[in-house]
Image: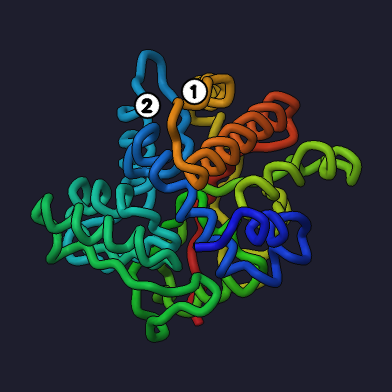
């Protein structure tokens, strides 16, 4: 664990976030994971809502959509690139019958994922490995498909991350997912005003656009079938409302200093995310792509 001043120095600017990426991400999730688990559950991603859905229903709907679009099924080996505490991997394994390996930098999150999979009787089909998306600990052409839900945004070199995913994916395999993006048309002043605060408070080195995503995927060997804003699939306003409610809530009394810092960090991060989203500077984007035959 870091003291809060050391962490603040790491997240203070892009150069520090890139240079201290692993340490920063580990510390961010050491601070944030308890709050995410209590307020969001075991799936740390922002889902589009259909009419009348609860948060839990919207999350599972999005995960089932990923499995269907990716054509995941029994006997397939799937990689979850940036698996968090394992919620999506476990749900998608149950829904699709596939075997899923999650990779993550954060040891404590992997422990939670393994424990949850075991308690749900999925320890034989869900495994969780410590590793970096930019240097995956797997052989070439190992997986039948790959998905990622709002995790690659943490990496300082997106080209290396997508290139590694291409390396471990079998030719003809599907790579599908969602992530955080800035608007394609955003100028530098609006990026500094609206996106940089999101990057600072979530320990993201920087943020790319959907247009840039397409170019990088193509450069490492993917054919991009579709990409866009997840609002094409449902409303994100319920997500922003939930985040806004937390950002405006009062800190519970009696918290230890580290928990106070975590609460303040999460409150600020949720507030700046809502501001950026409602000013059309920030979005959750999706893509589906296929790896060309080598």
Residue named by callout 1: 242
Label 1 sits on a secondary structure element that is helix
Task: Using the image as rendered, state which of residue 148 and residue 198 is in the foreground.
Answer: 198
Task: Using the image as rendered, state which of residue 26 and residue 262 is in the foreground.
Answer: 262
> Residue drawn at (44%, 60%), measured in percent from left and top?
82
Quarter holding residue 205: bottom right
Label 2 sits on a secondary structure element that is helix
Residue named by callout 2: 55
Q: Is residue 101 left or right of residue 269?
A: left
Q: Measure the C-alpha gap from mark 2 to mark 1.
A: 9 Å
Q: According to the image, what is the colour scheme of the structure?
A: rainbow
> Residue drawn at (41%, 21%), measured in percent from left and top?
50
Q: Is residue 215 visible?
A: no
> Is residue 286 placed above or below 279 in the rendered structure?
below
Q: Is residue 128 left or right of residue 252?
A: left
Q: Is residue 57 left or right of residue 240?
A: left
Outermost residue to the top: 52
> Residue drawn at (43%, 74%), measured in percent from left and top?
131
Classify mark 1: residues with Cα within 10 Å, few (<14), some (14-19) or many (20+). Answer: some
Classify mark 2: residues with Cα within 10 Å, few (<14), some (14-19) or many (20+). Answer: some
Of mark 2 and mark 1, the one earlier in the sequence is 2
Q: Is residue 222 left or right of residue 210?
A: left
Question: What label sits on residue 221 in the rendered view?
Answer: none
Task: Using the image as rendered, state which of residue 12 and residue 77 is in the foreground.
Answer: 12
> Is residue 53 placed above or below 192 in the rendered structure?
above
Mark 2 and mark 1 in contact? Answer it, CB < 8 Å: yes
Q: Position of residue 234 (x, y in %)?
A: 49, 26
> Is residue 10 placed above or below 191 in the rendered structure?
below
Outermost residue to the left: 121
Q: Position of residue 267 (x, y in %)?
A: 58, 32
> Residue drawn at (45%, 68%), measured in percent from left and top?
105
């Amino acid at each position: 664990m870091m003291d809060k001043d050391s962490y603040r120095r790491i997240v203070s600017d892009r150069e520090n976030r890139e240079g201290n990426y692993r340490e920063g991400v580990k510390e961010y999730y050491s601070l944030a994971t308890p709050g995410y688990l209590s307020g969001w559950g075991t799936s740390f991603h922002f889902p589009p809502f259909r009419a009348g859905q609860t948060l839990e229903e919207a999350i599972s709907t999005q995960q089932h959509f990923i499995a269907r679009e990716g054509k995941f099924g029994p006997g397939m080996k799937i990689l979850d690139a940036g698996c968090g505490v394992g919620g999506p991997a476990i749900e998608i394994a149950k829904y699709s019958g596939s075997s899923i390996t999650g990779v993550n930098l954060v040891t404590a999150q992997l422990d939670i994922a393994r424990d949850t999979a075991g308690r749900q009787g999925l320890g034989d089909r869900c495994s969780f490995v410590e590793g970096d998306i930019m240097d995956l600990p797997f052989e070439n052409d190992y997986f039948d498909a790959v998905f990622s839900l709002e995790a690659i945004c943490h990496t300082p070199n997106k080209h290396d991350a997508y290139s590694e995913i291409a390396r471990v994916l079998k030719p003809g395999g599907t790579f599908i997912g969602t992530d955080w993006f800035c608007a394609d048309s955003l100028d530098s002043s609006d990026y500094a005003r609206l996106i940089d605060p999101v990057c600072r408070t979530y320990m993201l080195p920087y943020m790319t656009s959907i247009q840039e995503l397409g170019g990088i995927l193509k450069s490492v060997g993917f054919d991009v079938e579709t990409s866009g804003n997840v609002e094409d699939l449902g409303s994100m306003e319920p997500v922003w409302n939930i985040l806004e409610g937390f950002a405006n809530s009062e800190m519970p009394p009696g918290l230890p200093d580290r928990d106070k810092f975590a609460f303040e960090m999460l409150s600020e991060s949720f507030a700046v995310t809502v501001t950026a989203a409602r000013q059309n500077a920030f979005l959750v984007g999706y893509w589906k792509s296929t790896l060309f035959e080598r």
